[in-house]
Image (cartoon, helix red, strand yellow):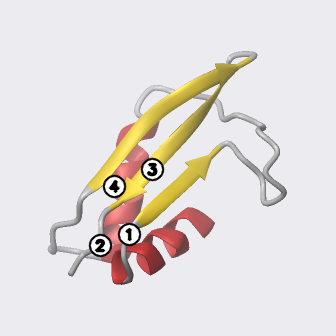
Amino acid sequence: TAAQEAAVAFSNADGGVILIGVDDAGTILGRELSPGLIDEIHRAIREEILGDRVLGLTVIIVGALDERWLLEVEVIAAG
């Protein structure tokens, strides 16, 4: 996914932030917050990037818009 690709790039550089629920034009669309979504994000990004290596990864629920949520994923550089 685009989030996985961005996380790989951030982990190989200086780190960065991925916003989930925002389109490429910067419009806030929100994302349905289903049970286990944050765990799914952690698992998908960790599997894509590192396998057994450790990565600093934080998922923050930033806010809500009509029952849809904006999530911030902070990726710490792997080096």
According to the picture, the residue beneath numbered tag 1 turns out to be 15
Is the Cβ of the residue at disc 4 closer than 8 Å to that at disc 3? no
According to the picture, the residue beneath numbered tag 4 turns out to be 43
**Mark 1 closeness class: few <14, some 14–19, many ≥20 residues within 10 Å:** some
Which dot, 3 or 1, sits closer to the camera? Answer: 1
Disc number at residue 77?
Answer: 2
Q: Amino acid at mark 1?
A: Gly
Q: CA distance from mark 4 to mark 2?
A: 17 Å
Is the Cβ of the residue at disc 2 closer than 8 Å to that at disc 1? yes
Q: CA distance from mark 4 to mark 1?
A: 18 Å
Which dot, 4 or 3, sits closer to the camera? Answer: 3
Please identify the quarter of the rendering in which residue 1 is found: bottom right
Q: Amino acid at mark 2?
A: Ala
Q: CA distance from mark 3 to mark 1?
A: 11 Å
Q: Secondary structure at mark 2?
A: loop
Please identify the quarter of the rendering in which residue 36 is found: top left
